[in-house]
Amino acid sequence: MLGSGFMTHSFAVFRRPELAAETTAFDEWAVDALTRGDVDALTDYRKRAPGAAVAHPSAEHFVPLLLTVGAAEDPAGAVSAIDRLVLGNSIRSVQLA
């Protein structure tokens, strides 16, 4: 199963490149939560993730990851199929079994 799309979705970072620190912090937090299979943390990302307000000002671009994690047999088995930053956003996509 492949969860595709940007790990972060911020138009603000296009106008203010210094906000890339926020999207990077969010991406690193999400990778750690995925690696640990911490579904509760991922679900509560608005309160727990650093940079969430910048990385995902609205939920619709993060919810597909939650659906992918929920459908996975092993949520802790996430592998980054794509891992890079483009214009301050993480375009990470994860693969889960």
Image: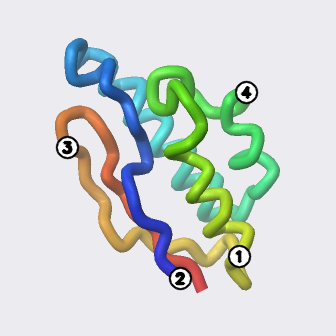
Label 2 and label 1: CA atoms lie apart by 9 Å
Camera-side mark, 1 or 3: 1
Which amino acid, by three-letter code, is at mark 2? Met
7 is higher (above) or lower (below) than 24: below
Q: Residue furthest right?
A: 40
In the picture of the structure, the residue carrying the numbered disc 1 is 71
Disc 4 marks a residue whose amino acid type is: Lys
Which quadrant would residue 37 be assigned to in this image? bottom right
Q: Are marks 4 and 1 in contact (CB under 8 Å)?
A: no
Which mark sits nearer the N-terminus, 1 or 3? Answer: 1
Disc 2 target residue? 1
Q: Position of residue 10 (x, y in %)?
A: 37, 29
Relative to 47, does residue 6 appear above or below in the rendering? Answer: below
Q: CA distance from mark 4 to mark 1?
A: 23 Å
The label shown at residue 86 is: 3
Q: What x and y, as percent, mark residue 91?
A: 31, 52
Name the side, left or right, on which 67 lies relative to 27: right
**Dot 2 lies on which element?**
loop
Give neighbour class at mark 2: few <14, some 14-19, many 20+ (Cα, 10 Å). Answer: few
